[in-house]
Amino acid sequence: MIRFLVTVVLLTIVYVLTLAHFDPWDFALGAVLASGVYLMFQSWVFPIGDTTTRQPAPPLWRRIIAAPIYAAMVVINITKWALLVSLYVLRIRPVERQGVIGLPYGERSEVGVVVSAYADTLTPGSVIVDFDEERRISWTHVIDATDPDGFRDETDELYDRYQRHVIP
C-alpha cells in the first residue's frame, strides 16, 4: 500500500508540474491517472513472482540507471540501420539478399520479447513478421539478410549488454 501511495503521489506531482498550474481538479485528475498508470504497469515496474519471467528482474534502481543507456544504444542502432537503408534507397549499395531471419528468444521474459521485437521493428530495414511461441523464435524480415548469424549476434548483443539490465 505504501508503494502504491508513494508512486501515485510522485506521478501526480509530475503531472501537475507538467501542467504548470495548481488547480485542485488537476491534482485529482493527476491522482486518477497516476493510479491507472500504477495499476497497468505495476507488474512490470515492481515484478513479484511472475511465472513468465525466465530470469529475475534486476532491482528497480539498477533498471532506472540502465534505461537511458539502453535507449541510447537503440537510437545508435536505429541510426546505423537508417544510414544503411539510405545507401540501398539511393542505390549506392545494392541489395544482395533480403529475407526472413529467425531470432531465438533465449531467456527473455514475455515483456522482454515484446521490447526486443519493438526495438527490432523500430530499426529501419527490419520488421517482425511472426512469433513462434512453441519454439520461442521471432521471425524478422530484414533488408540485408546476407549474414543471418551476424544479425542474430547483433540482436543478442543488444539484449545481453543493455536490455537485460532494464527488461529481462
Image (cartoon, rainbow, N blue to C red):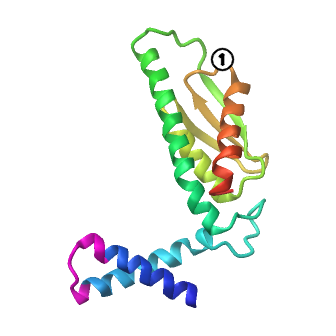
Which residue corresponds to the image point at 43% horizontal and 9% vertical from the top-left?
91
Q: Which residues are magenta?
A: 16-25
Q: Is residue 19 magenta?
A: yes
Instruction: Work out whether residue 3 or residue 134 is closer to the camera in this orientation and state it.
Output: 3
> Which x, y percent locates residue 35?
45, 82
Instruction: Write the residue at 60% across / 52% down.
Output: 114
From the viewer's perspective, tell me whether residue 116 is left or right of residue 35: right
SS under mark 1: loop
In x, y percent, where is residue 14? 36, 73
Vertical placement of residue 49 versus 108, above or below:
below
Quadrant of the image containing the N terminus: bottom right
Residue type (three-letter) at the residue carrying disc 1: Thr
Does residue 94 show up? yes
Q: How many marks?
A: 1
Name the residue beneath numbered marker 1: 146
What is the x, y in percent for residue 119? 55, 44
Q: Which quarter shows the C terminus? A: bottom right
